[in-house]
Image (tube, rainbow, N blue to C red):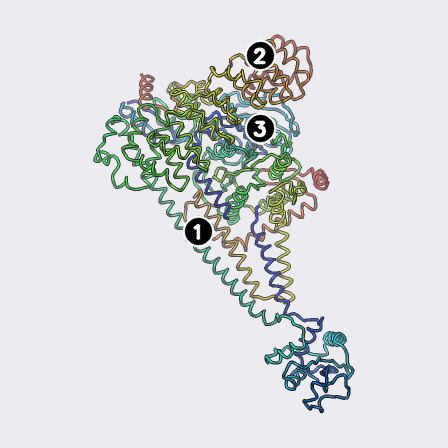
Amino acid sequence: MEDFQAKIIILFILLMHSSQVCFSQDSIRSLTDSSSVMIFLAEQEEVPGLAYRLVFTSPDQIKNFGADSIIDLTNNEFAISRRFDRLKDVFAWKNNFTPQDSIDSEIQFTLYEQPVNWQKTRDFLNDALAKGEISISSQVIENGSDLISMAHHVPFQSSKKNGFGFFSDLKIFMITAIIVLFVVITISMMLFMIIFKSNKNKKERLRLEYDEKIVGPLSEILFDRSREEIKSLSSEDLHSYFPAELLIKPLFKEVLIERVLSLNKTMKGDFKQKLKALFKRLEFDKLSKESLSSLKWDRVVAGLVQINEMDLTEAETEVKKLVNSSNFQIRSQAVATLLNISKSVDLSFLRDQTFPLSRWQQMNYLRIIRYLQSQKDLHLESLFESENQSIRLFGYKLVRILGRVDLVQLMVDKFDKVSETEKIEMLYTFEVIGVPVDSKLITDSLRSDNEKLIRRSALAAGQIGDESTEVALWEILPNTTSFQLRKTILKSLKSLNPTKYNSFIKVNSLTDLQEINSHLLDPLLQDV
Amino acid sequence: MVLSALEMRDQRRKNRFADYQDIITSPIAPGVSILAPAFNEGATIVQNVKSLLSLHYGKFEVIVINDGSKDDTLAKLCDGFEMELTSYAYDYEIACNKIRGIYKSRNRSFNRLIVIDKENGGKADALNAGINVASMELMACIDVDCILSSGSITRMVRPFMEETNRKVIAVGGVIGIANNCDVQDGTVTKYRIPDSLLGRFQVIEYCRAFLMGRMAWTRINGLMLISGAFGFFRRELVVEVGGYFPKTVGEDMELVVRMRRYMEEQGQPYKVSFVPDPLCWTEVPEDEAVLSRQRNRWMRGTIETLQLHRVIKMNLKYGLMGMISYPYWSIFEKMAPVLEVMGLIYTIVLISIGDFSAFYFVALFVVLYLLSILVSSFSLLYEQIAFNNYKDKKDLNKLILTILIEPFYIHPKVVYWGLRGHWDFIKGKGGWGQMIRTGFKKSEDKKNLESTVNS
Amino acid sequence: MKKILIIEDDLLISSLVQFRLKKDGYETILVKDGNAGILAIDQEDPDLIITDVMIPFKNGIEIIHHARKTKPNVPIIVLSSLGEEEDIVLEAFNLGVADFVPKPFNPNELAIRIKRILK
């Protein structure tokens, strides 16, 4: 669908147009202005009926030349030369006669012996050209001096005729250059592609091969050796598992590190400790720390991930420096790592972040927090005090996911003061945790005019509601127009007070009520 | 090229550190409703739905919409998955054709599956019917015969999860060509390029479109089209803008444009994202007649969408979309075939009046040819670096050959089909071109279309 | 000698489990995907099946279904990274699996559970 050829075509048209301007120089001209008439005539031989003579406006100047035979000095006002049939001759003569430019003269046309102005001449010429009465001679004036003398009579105009040759050469040169460039790029790209491909295939094969070489020894080490033994493994022993010549290969190291990290994620208990001991014994921890100072962000993050997974607590100071990195990836990984390896850190640093917290980050933090919460007090409740709404919301979410019943009361206390978005999140948490809260919270929310909030509180009412919330639900039901919301309300009512719900359904024959009722009763639709 | 290269590099690096396993289980991850409209798919429906159900993700549901199939699609589904008619209380929140029934399985292991049986109304209408039932935060609109890789949901969900201050409204994905590949239980196990030239040409074309075009647009956040075969949307927002517009043949593009327009008008910062990983494969038509109808339809869809949202054109209020994306689409996508033909006629006229230098003609032609090869091979290079799906050297050589002959042999046809699309649009032909692959047919709203487009 | 079928797409994990079970004197069959899993259930006649719920080609639930149907007496252990509260895991319990081991896990612990089940 996205058709890039179009772009090329447009480029094409543009190029065509610009070259067109140049081509038009060759086309048949129709004479329009005095200079074009002059240029045209200068190239011609005789034109039947047309003749030329020179008119000297100050006759005194030429008296000295004594060329009376040619110049008619009868008039005192101006002198007129004899007639010439070819314009070239006029120039030649004049050049010969008056080599200096100091003499004022101009060319006069005569048509059938009558003097005429240039417009008349032009019309005559155009007419003759159109009828084909004169043949065009396009010989190039080679005599430079002729041109110069002509220029004296013609208003200045840049000579395109000569320039064209130069420009066209340059164009040909440029186009050839572009073509060559393209050919070179294309060929080199294809070559690169083929080489790259074979390299990549080779790398993939090697990875698989290394993978197989790692599995066996790794299992042996993990099951047959204790943690202490791994720590003090001699180089000889180590190399009997992983040959020394493989261990120096960067790709092998990469695969091995990847494998150790992924196993660390799926294993539990002493296996984790053993993997960490092995990681250090292989001296991969040094590599991790080195990569922290790399300029490429992906290497830095890789190092951080390793430090995080392998609990390399000694790198704490280096990691701390990266917490305020300008790179999003580095920043969030550094925070996650620090949270894990530092003994003193709690969640208060998260509270002070100003940027909205993405779910991606939430997911990563959740994993770490879940793991850490049994070991140290993270002060989860500090998140509630954040200036940043996304962080507060994350706090409520954490209470729900981690099941922190102890923090519910704190949330209840804040409930009245928070925004509706936060109320929704809080209500959801109350509902999931299932601790009955002050029913006023729910009834107030039910009576708000935010539909999302009403819906959430109606759901919560079904789980943790009491008589007063039931009353509120009955109250809002008749005024509710949204079908989905009616469904939610009825569902909650059904679970709160089945008897009253049933009698209500019996006396109401509204079709949508009946539809919803049968929906709610359908065993296949329990969770829809 | 530079833009797409940058975006691609970032994406590749990000992938290295993403723990996609984590998304599957994390309670923070959003739920996904997969909407798959089906029309006369009886032969393959059970297999296709099975592979959808075995996607690796924690919170998702699969909604199959039987769009009034004339074959045994529904019966096959009921048999295959022990489906039973329920008394689901259907809410026509977004208008769509009449729902005949909603089915669920007695068997708890197919708990994720919901089947909607409705009267035929075309793809957009079927999707609208599905949106009304979808209960998750996100929805994925796919063609039911697409092959999705098992990790595709996690990958596609990621941009939504990375959202910070700009709302991510939709995410598009790359579509690969599955012709001639080995497929086993809904996973491509061996990649091979298609046998026919037309098929191979489409491989190149898809690489170009997805890897170059859309990557570059994503970089500047100007993406206007998410393929109807594989796209993720925020359900809430789709409902707010009123769902799919059933009267256009380009409903996929139209929806994205409308969502963008809505966000611009609301003044909310937003983003349309794109995931360049190979996650979805589909069979493309290798038959010329079918392909020509498909192209014809795409062209009409583009014209219709652009016409419908004319307000956006060069309108500063719509920011980048109005100033760059829209004009780009009008000139390079919509008008491309017209301009190309005009350029050709222009050239022929110049030659015939003899006012043309042969040298320039040849030179320009060679430049254009090389440029097209350059772009094509660049996108193929991308494919090789990024995915490396076509591992066989012979395949690669064939693709290179295709690149070389494409401008002479296939491109003129594509231009011709595009022109036919223009012509059909002018004639006011609406609805889906009858496409054998999906079989969606619809031509009765000719009049409706005309009235909406011309109003 | 008891035969144990392991259906798991991560080679490293399955090899590790295999290594551990060999020490206890079990015969093990490693399978990487759902199709091969179903095939192995039919042909190899295992005494116990260890499976993930998310594996290539097939839904883990389908495998459990298949095993229940064809070999109702063979105990099944689900090894999964999904939490116990996930639908799909509850589903597995409904189908009557013998045990559920969430990842991360300890292979030694898994071996003990297997021993207990096979007694």
Chain to which mark 1 belongs: B
User: Badges 2 and 1: C-beta atoms under 8 Å apart?
Assistant: no
Chain to which mark 2 belongs: A
Q: Please give the label number shown on residue B280.
A: none
For disc 2, the neighbor class at 10 Å (few under 14, some 14 to 19, many from 20) is: some
Q: Considering the numbered disc 1 on the image, is that residue within a helix, a strand or a loop?
A: helix
User: At which x and y percent is residue A435?
Assistant: 51, 13
Q: CA distance from mark 2 to mark 1?
A: 72 Å
Labels 2, 3: one chain: no
Labels 2, 1: one chain: no
In front of the other: A421 or A380: A380
Q: Is residue A170 above or below residue C66?
A: below
Q: Residue at x 28, y 31 (%)?
A: A278
Q: Residue at x 46, y 41 (%)?
A: B10
Q: Considering the numbered disc 3 on the image, is that residue within a helix, a strand or a loop?
A: helix
Quadrant housing residue B234 = top right
Work out which quarter of the rendered image holds the C terminus of chain A and state it. top right
Q: Which residue is mark 3?
A: B74
For disc 1, the neighbor class at 10 Å (few under 14, some 14 to 19, many from 20) is: few
Q: Please give the label number shown on residue A439.
A: 2
User: Badges 2 and 3: C-beta atoms under 8 Å apart?
Assistant: no
- Amino acid carrying label 3: it is Leu
User: At which x and y percent is residue A365?
Assistant: 44, 27
Q: CA distance from mark 1 to mark 3?
A: 44 Å
Work out which quarter of the rendered image holds the N terminus of chain A and state it. top right
Q: Is residue B211 above or below residue B54?
A: below
User: At which x and y percent is residue C100?
Assistant: 39, 20
User: At which x and y percent is residue A501?
Assistant: 62, 11
